[in-house]
Image: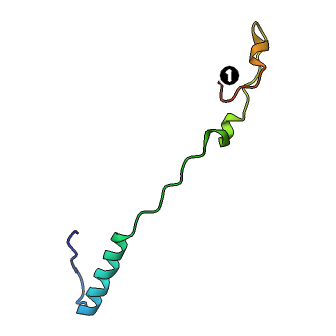
């Protein structure tokens, strides 16, 4: 644990003990869990289609593709 110093004022021993307990309790708590990223099927950008372009092979591109994958 790092050093704790009083730089201004004169706290009583009880106040100092309370401060140390709060800092120690805060340091002992686990960090908040990081939410998991959305799964691929739930990602909205995979539901969007690319614009269709006319030309050779355009009929192949007209089929449904998820994220550009066939």
| Quarter of the figure with the N terminus | bottom left
Q: Which residue is mark 1?
A: 70
| Quarter of the figure with the C terminus | top right
Q: What residue lies at 23% left-to-right and 91% top-to-bottom?
A: 13
Q: Is 60 situated above or below 6?
A: above
Task: Name the side, left or right, on which 2 lies relative to 29.
Answer: left
Residue 40 versus residue 8: which sits nearer the camera?
40
Task: Name the side, left or right, on which 9 lies relative to 33.
Answer: left
Task: Give neighbour class at mark 1: few <14, some 14-19, many 20+ (Cα, 10 Å).
Answer: few
Q: Is 2 situated above or below 46?
A: below
Secondary structure beneath label 1 = loop
Task: Name the side, left or right, on which 32 lies relative to 5.
Answer: right
Residue 10 versus residue 39: which sits nearer the camera?
39
Displayed quadrant of residue 22: bottom left
Displayed quadrant of residue 68: top right
Residue 17 location (% of width, % of height): 27, 86
Q: What residue lies at 77% left-to-right and 9% top-to-bottom?
A: 55
Residue 26 location (% of width, % of height): 37, 73
Q: What residue lies at 62% left-to-right and 39% top-to-bottom?
A: 40
Residue 48 versus residue 8: which sits nearer the camera?
48
Displayed quadrant of residue 2: bottom left
């Amino acid at each position: 644990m790092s050093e704790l110093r009083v730089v201004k004022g004169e706290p009583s021993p009880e106040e100092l003990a309370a401060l140390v307990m709060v800092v120690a309790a805060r340091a002992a708590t686990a960090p908040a869990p990081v939410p998991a990223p959305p799964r691929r099927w739930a990602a909205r950008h995979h539901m969007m289609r690319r614009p269709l372009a006319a030309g050779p092979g355009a009929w192949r591109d007209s089929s449904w593709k998820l994220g550009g994958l066939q």
